Amino acid sequence: MKLTINRFQFVILFVMLYAFRTFFGLSKLFYGDSDINRDALQTYLIGLKFYTTHNWPYFGPDQYDQTTGFHFQIAGALEGLMVGLPFYIWHIPEAPFLFLNLLSLTALALLAWYLSKKFKNLSMTFILVWLALMPWTLNQSTHVFNVSYLLFGSVVFFLGFFEAVPEFSNGWFSAAWAFALMGFGLFWDMQFHQSWVLLVPFLLGAWAWRRKFKLDSKGELMGFILGSILPFDCLLPTLLQYGVLKPGGGLAHAATLFHFDNFKMVLTILARYLSLPSFEMPRFMGGSTAERWALLLQIPFVIPTGFFLFLVGVIQPFVLLFFPWFDERKDRGTRRLYGLAMSGFLLVWVCFWFSTTGPSAHMYYVLLPMVAAYSFAVWDQLALKPFAQGLAVICIFASLWFQTGTACQQISGDSLYQDRNRIVQAIHEKDYQLLAPRRPWVIY
């Protein structure tokens, strides 16, 4: 799909996508009716607390186990800084959303630009619009919540990984730059979610791959260190103040010798994994079929597009799973990316053997850029077929229509605008507790 536009038109497109994604993020659940539904509010409070008290945010996301009652905070100041610093520029409640969406859309544009150079039948415009309107990137990178900040770090990491491995490289970055990007992405994601551990095998794999083929290692270590400096500097004060053991307690708690229930969920994990770059609509419409129907009945004009996208979202993982086996062109690049994506799936599955945590898809959302790269390799093979071109355009407009309808419905509910004035007061009076208190067990 070659949708060629000039620079001015691209800027207009970027601004339109930015406005839409920001509106969508602002429509999401903010206040919540129970503690488990207040994660977004608590994330917001960490940044607001930093802005109003000027106290260094040693810890970030709240993590807790509902079954055992175990709780902890992820070490590092990045979440507090990313949510709180925008208030210094814009003294309005929407400031963190405006910054987050600029950050996430910039990451998607960077990924789209990179992939457009790799796949000659796909334009940057098509890739960017597709990425920006996918359910996972819309719901998990537009709303102020810790998982939303993973996308930026993951995109940077995998751009470095692709350039570090010759089989995937476009030959644009030196090894030093590639490892610098991986270092930055790793220590960025480390401060937002425990799933950062899934990136470590890819870092080590890239290093081992280069050693196997006796490639020049000059600059790899120094590049990794230099790339890590900025995000690591946000983690270092926590390590100095609280030591190493306290920040790492969450990972130790989640570990187990063997979790047979997770082992048995191999097909469930595979389906969820391949749904990351797909139109997986139901997940973000409610926790049960009844809730999803209740939402649709409130906005009946989106029901036809909802059913269409649901069918597409069911078919897409099967296409991604079996496409290389039936591809007559036997494209080596596609097969390599398929092998990489399937290696990622096996890594996720095996990791859950030793985790007490259930295999919810957001636990491996950190791998989305890699799986998306493989999905665009498939699109690149289909791009010249008129049916595929038509289907892609219909999916884009259907997604835009459906997501606009749901956002318009949700923004009048428990979004930030349920009580915006309370946030305005907290900002102006420099007292975050006017909005809400932090959870009683948190360190920060």
Image (spheres, rainbow, N blue to C red):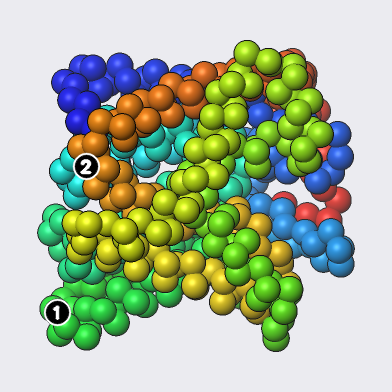
Q: Which quarter of the figure has residue 42?
A: top right
| Vertical arrangement, residue 429 with respect to residue 436, above or below | above
Amino acid marked by disc 1 = Leu
| Vertical arrangement, residue 106 with respect to residue 333, above or below | above
Residue at 66 percent across and 29 percent down: it is 28
Left or right of 16 in this view: 270: right
Residue at 72 percent across and 78 percent down: it is 259
Residue 9, can we see it? yes
- For the N terminus, which image quadrant? top left
Most foreground residue, 207 or 99: 207
Q: What's the mark number on residue 215?
A: 1
Residue at 74 percent across and 32 percent down: it is 292
Residue at 31 percent across and 49 percent down: it is 378
Q: Earlier in the sequence, mark 1 or mark 2?
A: 2
- Residue 75, percent from left and from top: 61, 61
- Residue 414, percent from left and from top: 76, 25
Amino acid marked by disc 2 = Ser
Give the residue pinned by disc 2: 116
